[in-house]
Amino acid sequence: MIDVPLKVSDLGLSSPPLSGSIKRKPEDFQVTEVPLYPPSGQGEFLYLQIRRTGMNTRDVLADLGRAFQVLPDDVGYAGLKDRQSVSTQWFS
């Protein structure tokens, strides 16, 4: 972790000084996807909850496509997640 002092006066504002830190490790950024609704149980779907670090959503889609012999476009997901995080995400 890098500590970077930041003074409001550096920004041209007149307030008390602020301090903070810049976080750099994937563990500093935790993302847990919460589905809007539970699986319906209808149809032939496989739901996977995947926890990953060092991979973005597109990397996971490519791996799932190869593993299940489907096109990555045929895999459902709710949104893109950053590679530089610890992300838990649902795929179908």
Image: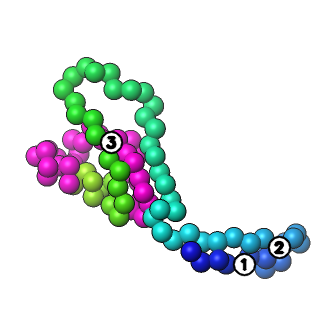
**Residue highlighted by disc 3:** 49
Mark 3 residue type = Gln
Q: Which residue is mark 1?
A: 5
Q: Nearer the viewer, mark 2 or mark 3?
A: 3
Task: Compare residues 76 and 30 and report the one nearer the observer.
Answer: 30
Residue at far left of view: 69
Horizontally, residue 21 falls left or right of residue 49, namely: right
Q: Looking at the image, do the residues carrying marks 1 and 2 touch, with CB atoms under 8 Å apart?
A: yes
Which contiguous range is marked in magenta? 63-92
Tell me which numbered mark, 3 or 1, is placed earlier along the sequence. 1
Tell me: 1 left or right of 48. right
**In which quadrant of the rendered image does the C terminus lie?**
top left
What residue is shown at x 35% (from left), y 55% (from top)?
52
- Is residue 75 depicted above or below 80 in this figure? above
Q: Position of residue 66 (x, y in %)?
A: 14, 52
Q: Which residue is identified by label 2?
A: 17
